[in-house]
C-alpha cells in the first residue's frame, strides 16, 4: 500500500513539475490575490492596452489608516481620469531603503516612486532614474507657486526639479500632560537648562523623563540633525554636508553627541535605549511611563491633543548655528525615466499635490501639507495649524541627517548614534566619520 | 548498581530534566504569549493569559500569515519534489551507469555541499534578474533545489549503492526500459531514504530566510519567515500579535517532527556516519 | 554494479542536477569575483571598472575585520557548545541517564532545531527585552539581579546573546548526530571496560572519543563553516547592531550591497567569505578519502 502511495506522489509530482514549468513561462509577475489588506496588490505589467494606461506607484505608507486615505485619493483620481489606472505598492520605512533600489534595477520598474530628499534623491538623479520636471512646473505656474517653496526647493538639484514634495514631517516634542501634572510641571521648557531641570524633576518622581527607541538609529540621528544645526555654524555645516569639506572637526558635532550622552548618564533616557524599538518608546509615553518623546508630526494622530502637548526643541545658550530652523523633511515623489507615460504620471502628481488631496491628508491622517490652503479650520486642529504656520515661517529646514549626507558617511554617522551610548567618545566617533568622509569625497 | 553510580545517574537525570525545561519553557511562553494582550505583556512577563482569546491569532493570520503559509507550503512542496526527483536521478546515474569521469561528476555534485549560499546572494540575484526570474515563484524555487541537491544526492546514493544490482538486471531482462526500472522499481524500493531526503529538504526550504529575503520582492510571494520579520519591523507592532505569529509559524514543523521523528533522525544519522 | 551504457538516458538523469549546481552554486562563485572588480549598485545602468581596488580596501577595512572576528567568536563558541558539549551531553544522555528520560530528552531538545531561525530569533528578541521578556525577571528571582543588562542593546553582550540563541537552537541537533555514532559503538566494549573497573570518565576518553573521532571532526567542520556563513540569526535579531557589535560577514555583505549601494564591494566580501570557508572545506575533504568511498567500497 505504501508503494502505491509513493508512486502516486511521484506521478503527481511529475505532473506538478510540468505545470509549474508552463506557469514559469508565463512571465515575471504572479497575479495572485494578496490576502493582506494593509499592503496593496501586485503591480501588473505596466503599459497600455486599448488606451488604458497603468502606472506603477511605490509609496511608503503601508499603515492601515494611511492606505485607506491613499486609496481614496487614487480612486477619485481614476474617476476623473478613466484611462489611467494606478497600481500602488506600499513598503515600510526600513524595508523601502533596500527594496526600492532593487525594484529600480529590476524588470518591474515603478513609474512613480517615493524618495527622501538630499543624497537619496541625488543618487537617483545620478543614475538617470528621475525625470526632470522643471518644464512641467514652469508650464503650470499656479501649481508651482502654490507649493511651500522651501519644501519645493529640496527637489531642486543644480537648477532643475527632479521630484515634487507630497507631505512633510517635522520634529517636535510630545509630552504626556498627566505625567507633567503629576510632577508639578506647569509650562513646557523653552531652554535647554529648563529642559534638563524638568528631566530631573520627572526622574525623581519615578518616571522616565525621555523615551528614545534607538534600535534603528535614525531616531537618535534626528536628534543629532537638530543639535548639529543649532551648534555648528551654518557655512561649516553646509560644507561638511555637501562634501566640500571632509573634516568634521567643528566642536559643535562632538558637543551634539555629548549632550545626548549626558542625558543618558544622568538617567534622563530609558537605559535600554539601543534595543528599545521606536514603537515601544512611543508606548512608554502613551502609557504614562515616560514623560516626553521627540517625535514626528507625521505621527501626530497617535498623540491625542487632550492628553498630550507639544513643544519645540529647546534653545541652547550660545548656539553657533542659525536660530529658528525646523528639523524635518519632505516625502517626495519622482517620475521614473523609464516611465512610458510621463505626462500622465505628472497629471497624477498634480492631483496628489492639489489643494483637494492635500486637505484630505491633513484631515484624515494629520499629515503636514506642502501646498497653501490645505490646512484650514475644517481640516486641522488649532495646534496643527500653529505648527504648520511656524514651519512655513521658519528661515530654513534642517533636513534629516541620514538623507543629506553621502550614504556611506550617513551610515557611519548612524553607527555613531548608537555607539555614543556604548561608551565610545564623541571625539573618536567624529574622527571615524571624518575618516570615512575623506575616503568618499 | 553501586550507590555511586546510582547517584551519578540521579544527577544526570536531573540535569536532563533541567535541559528539557530550558528548551521547552521559551516555546511554551511563546505559545501562551499569543493569547495575551500587549498591556498584559507589558505589565509582567509571568502573567498568565486572562482567557483563551484567539483574536491575536486570527488578526495575524489575516494580516499576512495566510498568504505566507500558502507560499511556504508551495515552495516547500514543489522544491522538495524537484530535489528528490533530481537527486534520485543523479544518484541512480552514478550507481548504475558506466561512464568515463564518473569520479569527476560525483565530486562535482558532492562538492556543492561545501559552498554555502550566503556569499553568493548577489550573483544569484543577478542571474535570476538576467533570466527574468527575479521575484517569481520559480526563481525562488530553483536556488532552493540547487542547494539541496548535493546533500540529498548523497543520502540517496549511499542508499542506492547497497541495493542489489540483480533486481535491476532482472528488470532489464524482462524488457524494462531504464526509466521504467527507475520509477517502478528503484524508487519504491528506496522509500525510506526518499522520505528522509524529502523531510530534510522540506525542513530547510520551509525555514529559509535569506533566499526569500533577497530573491523576492512582492508581498504575494513572501514566505512565513519573511512575514514574521516584516511583522516585527512594521510600525505599530503588537508584540503579542507577533508571538501569535511565531506560534503559528512554528507549529507545522513541530507537528511534523512529532509525527515523523524517525525520518528526521535518519537524515541526520546518514550525515553523521557516512558523511 | 554499473550496468547501463545508454548515453542519452545518462544525460537526462544527470542534466538537471548538473545544470542547477553548475549555474546556481558554482557560477555564482565566479561571478562574485567578476562583479567585485566593478563599481555598481542595484539600480545602476552601467558598471565602472575598478580592478582590485575593493580588495585593497577590504584588507584595511576595520569593519570587515571586526565582522570576521565576530564570525571567529561564533565559531569558537559553537565548537565548544555544539561539537564538544554536544558530545558530552549525548554521552551522558545515552550512557548514564535512565532510558526513558534519555529518549524523552533527546526528542525534546531537538525541537528548536526544526523551527525556523527567524521564529527563534524573534522569540528571543522578546525574551531578552528588558521590559517585556522573562530573562531578566528570572535572573532577578534567582539572585543574579546584578548581572541584568540590556542584552541585545548593550555592545558588550549583544554578540554573545545572539550566539547563545544559536546554541540553544542547535544543541539538540548535535546531540542527535552524536547519538547515532555513540550507538554504533558495540556495548561489549563498555561492558568489558566496566568489568575492568573503568569509571565513566575513563570510558569516555579512552573508548568513546577515539571511536567517533570522524564524527567529531565532521561536526567541528560543519560548525566552523556554518559560523562563518551565519546570516539569519544576526539579521533578524539585531541587523548587526548596536553600532557594529554584532555585524558578521554575511550581514555586512548584505548591507553593503543593498543598503549602501556598493555592490562591487559586497561581492568582494563574498569572495573573501568563500575563500575562508573553502580553505576549511579543503581541509575537511583531505580528511576524508573521497575516491575510496565513492566506489561504494565499505559496507554500511
Image: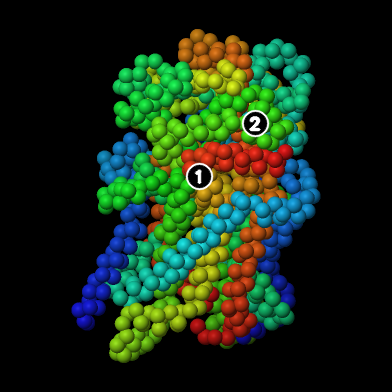
Residue A332: % across, % down = 64, 27
Mark 2 vs mark 1: same chain? no
- Residue A42 lies left or right of residue A9; in this view the side is right
Disc assigned to residue A404: 2
Q: Which residue is mark 1?
A: C242
Q: Nearer the viewer, residue A413 or B81?
A: A413
Res. C299 mark: none
Q: Position of residue A349 (x, y in %)?
A: 67, 23
- Along the horizontal axis of the image, is A242 left or right of B184? right
Q: How many neighbours does mark 2 have within 10 angstroms: few (below 14), some (14-19), or many (20 or more)?
A: many
Q: Residue at x 68, y 24 (%)?
A: A235
* Image spot of residue B237 (x, y percent): 44, 37
Which residue is depicted at the point 29% across and 66% down?
B15
Q: Chain of mark 2?
A: A
Most foreground residue, B42 or A65: B42
Mark 2 → mark 1, Cα distance in angstroms: 22 Å
Secondary structure, mark 1, is loop
Residue at image location 35% in from the left, 42% down from the top: C132
Q: Residue B42 location in percent, x, y? A: 33, 38
Residue B46 is drawn in which quadrant?
A: top left
- Is residue C129 shown left or right of residue A119? left
Which quadrant: the C terminus of chain A? top right
Q: Is residue A269 above or below residue B155?
A: above
Residue found at the very far left of the displayed protein: B3
Q: Chain of mark 1?
A: C
- Residue B186 appears in the figure: no
Amino acid at each position: 500500500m505504501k508503494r502505491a502511495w509513493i508512486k502516486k506522489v511521484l506521478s503527481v509530482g511529475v505532473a506538478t513539475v510540468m505545470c509549474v514549468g508552463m506557469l514559469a513561462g508565463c512571465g515575471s509577475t504572479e497575479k495572485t490575490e494578496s490576502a493582506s489588506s494593509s499592503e496593496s496588490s501586485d503591480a501588473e505589467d505596466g503599459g497600455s492596452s486599448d488606451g488604458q494606461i497603468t502606472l506603477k506607484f511605490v509609496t511608503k505608507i503601508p499603515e492601515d489608516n494611511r492606505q485607506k486615505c491613499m486609496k481614496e485619493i487614487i480612486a477619485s483620481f481614476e474617476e476623473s481620469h478613466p484611462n489611467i489606472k494606478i497600481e500602488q505598492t506600499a513598503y515600510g520605512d526600513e524595508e523601502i531603503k533596500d527594496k526600492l533600489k532593487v525594484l529600480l534595477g529590476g524588470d518591474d520598474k515603478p513609474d512613480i516612486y517615493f524618495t527622501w530628499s538630499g543624497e537619496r534623491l541625488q543618487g537617483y538623479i545620478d543614475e538617470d532614474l528621475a525625470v526632470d520636471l522643471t518644464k512641467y512646473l514652469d508650464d503650470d505656474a499656479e501649481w508651482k507657486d502654490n507649493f511651500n517653496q522651501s519644501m519645493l526647493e529640496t527637489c531642486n538639484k543644480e537648477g532643475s526639479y527632479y521630484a515634487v514634495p507630497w507631505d512633510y514631517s517635522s520634529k517636535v516634542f510630545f509630552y504626556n500632560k498627566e505625567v507633567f501634572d503629576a510632577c508639578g510641571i506647569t509650562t513646557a521648557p523653552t531652554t535647554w537648562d529648563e529642559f534638563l531641570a524638568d528631566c530631573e524633576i520627572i526622574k525623581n518622581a519615578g518616571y522616565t523623563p525621555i523615551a528614545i527607541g534607538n534600535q534603528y538609529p535614525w531616531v537618535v540621528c534626528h536628534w543629532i540633525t537638530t543639535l548639529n544645526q543649532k551648534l555648528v555654524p551654518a557655512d561649516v555645516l553646509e560644507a561638511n554636508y555637501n562634501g566640500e569639506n571632509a573634516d568634521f572637526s567643528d566642536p559643535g558635532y562632538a558637543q551634539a553627541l555629548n549632550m545626548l550622552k549626558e542625558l543618558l548618564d544622568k538617567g534622563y533616557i530609558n537605559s535600554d535605549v539601543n534595543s528599545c524599538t521606536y514603537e515601544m518608546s512611543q508606548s512608554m509615553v502613551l502609557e504614562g511611563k515616560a514623560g516626553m518623546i521627540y517625535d514626528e508630526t507625521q505621527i501626530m494622530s497617535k498623540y491625542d491633543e487632550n492628553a498630550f502637548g507639544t513643544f519645540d526643541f529647546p534653545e541652547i545658550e550660545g548656539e553657533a548655528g542659525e536660530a529658528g530652523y525646523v528639523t524635518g523633511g519632505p516625502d517626495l515623489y519622482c517620475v521614473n525615466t523609464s516611465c512610458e507615460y510621463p505626462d500622465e504620471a505628472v497629471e497624477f502628481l498634480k492631483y496628489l499635490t492639489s489643494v483637494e488631496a492635500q486637505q484630505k491628508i491633513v484631515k484624515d491622517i494629520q499629515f503636514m501639507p506642502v501646498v497653501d490652503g490645505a490646512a484650514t479650520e475644517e481640516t486641522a486642529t488649532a495646534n496643527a495649524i500653529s505648527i504648520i504656520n511656524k514651519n512655513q515661517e521658519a528661515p530654513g529646514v534642517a533636513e534629516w541627517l541620514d538623507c543629506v549626507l553621502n550614504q556611506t558617511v550617513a551610515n557611519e554617522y548612524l553607527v555613531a548614534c548608537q555607539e555614543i551610548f556604548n561608551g565610545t567618545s564623541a571625539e573618536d566617533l567624529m574622527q571615524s566619520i571624518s575618516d570615512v568622509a575623506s575616503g568618499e569625497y | 548498581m553501586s550507590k555511586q553510580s546510582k547517584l551519578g545517574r540521579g544527577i544526570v537525570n536531573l540535569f536532563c530534566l533541567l535541559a528539557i525545561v530550558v528548551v521547552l519553557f521559551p516555546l511554551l511562553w511563546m505559545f501562551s504569549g499569543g493569547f495575551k494582550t500587549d498591556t498584559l505583556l507589558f505589565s509582567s512577563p509571568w502573567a498568565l493569559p486572562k482567557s483563551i482569546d484567539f483574536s491575536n491569532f486570527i488578526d495575524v493570520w489575516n494580516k499576512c500569515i495566510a498568504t505566507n503559509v500558502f507560499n511556504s507550503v508551495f515552495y516547500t512542496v514543489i522544491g522538495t519534489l524537484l530535489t528528490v526527483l533530481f537527486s534520485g536521478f543523479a544518484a541512480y546515474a552514478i550507481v548504475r551507469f558506466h561512464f568515463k569521469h564518473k569520479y569527476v561528476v560525483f565530486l562535482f555534485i558532492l562538492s556543492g555541499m561545501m559552498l554555502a549560499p550566503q556569499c553568493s546572494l548577489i550573483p544569484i540575484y543577478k542571474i535570476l534578474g538576467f533570466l527574468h526570474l527575479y521575484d517569481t515563484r520559480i526563481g525562488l524555487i530553483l536556488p532552493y533545489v540547487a542547494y539541496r541537491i548535493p546533500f540529498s544526492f548523497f543520502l540517496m546514493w549511499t542508499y542506492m549503492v547497497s541495493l542489489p544490482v540483480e533486481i535491476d538486471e532482472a528488470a532489464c531482462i524482462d524488457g524494462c526500459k531504464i526509466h521504467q526500472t527507475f520509477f517502478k522499481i528503484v524508487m519504491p524500493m528506496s522509500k525510506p531514504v526518499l522520505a528522509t531526503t524529502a523531510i530534510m529538504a522540506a525542513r530547510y526550504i520551509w525555514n529559509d530566510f535569506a533566499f526569500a529575503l533577497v530573491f523576492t520582492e512582492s508581498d504575494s510571494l513572501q514566505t512565513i519567515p519573511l512575514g514574521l520579520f516584516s511583522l516585527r519591523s512594521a510600525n505599530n507592532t503588537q508584540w503579542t500579535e507577533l508571538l501569535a505569529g511565531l506560534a503559528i509559524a512554528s507549529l507545522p514543523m513541530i507537528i511534523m517532527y512529532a509525527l515523523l521523528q524517525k525520518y528526521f533522525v535518519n537524515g541526520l544519522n546518514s550525515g553523521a556516519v557516512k558523511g | 554494479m554499473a550496468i547501463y551504457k545508454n548515453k542519452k538516458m545518462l544525460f537526462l538523469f544527470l542534466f538537471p542536477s548538473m545544470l542547477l549546481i553548475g549555474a546556481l552554486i558554482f557560477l555564482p562563485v565566479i561571478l562574485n569575483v567578476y562583479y567585485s572588480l566593478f563599481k555598481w549598485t542595484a539600480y545602476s545602468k552601467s558598471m565602472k571598472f575598478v580592478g582590485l581596488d575593493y580588495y585593497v580596501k577590504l584588507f584595511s577595512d576595520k569593519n570587515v575585520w571586526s565582522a570576521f572576528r565576530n564570525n571567529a567568536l561564533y565559531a569558537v563558541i559553537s565548537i565548544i557548545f555544539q561539537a564538544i558539549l554536544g558530545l558530552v551531553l549525548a554521552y551522558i544522555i545515552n550512557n548514564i541517564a535512565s532510558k526513558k528520560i534519555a529518549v524523552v530528552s533527546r526528542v525534546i531538545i531537538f525541537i528548536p532545531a526544526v523551527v525556523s531561525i527567524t521564529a527563534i530569533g524573534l522569540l528571543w528578541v522578546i525574551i531578552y527585552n528588558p521590559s517585556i521578556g522573562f530573562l531578566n525577571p528570572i535572573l532577578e528571582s534567582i539572585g543574579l539581579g546584578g548581572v541584568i543588562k540590556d542584552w541585545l542593546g548593550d555592545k558588550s553582550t549583544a554578540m554573545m546573546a545572539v550566539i547563545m540563541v544559536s546554541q540553544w537552537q542547535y544543541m539538540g541537533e548535535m546531540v542527535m548526530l552524536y547519538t547515532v555514532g555513540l550507538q554504533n559503538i558495540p556495548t561489549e566494549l563498555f561492558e568489558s571496560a566496566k568489568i575492568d573497573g573503568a569509571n565513566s570518565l575513563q570510558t569516555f576518553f579512552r573508548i568513546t572519543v577515539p571511536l567517533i573521532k570522524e564524527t567529531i571532526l565532521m561536526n567541528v567542520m560543519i560548525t566552523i563553516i556554518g559560523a562563518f556563513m551565519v546570516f539569519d540569526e544576526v539579521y533578524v535579531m539585531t541587523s548587526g547592531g548596536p553600532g557594529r557589535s554584532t555585524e558578521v560577514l554575511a550581514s555586512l555583505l548584505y548591507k553593503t550591497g543593498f543598503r549602501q549601494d556598493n555592490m562591487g564591494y559586497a561581492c568582494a566580501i563574498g569572495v573573501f567569505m568563500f575563500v575562508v570557508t573553502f580553505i576549511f572545506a579543503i581541509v575537511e575533504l583531505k580528511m576524508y578519502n573521497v575516491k575510496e568511498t565513492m566506489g561504494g567500497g565499505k559496507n554500511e
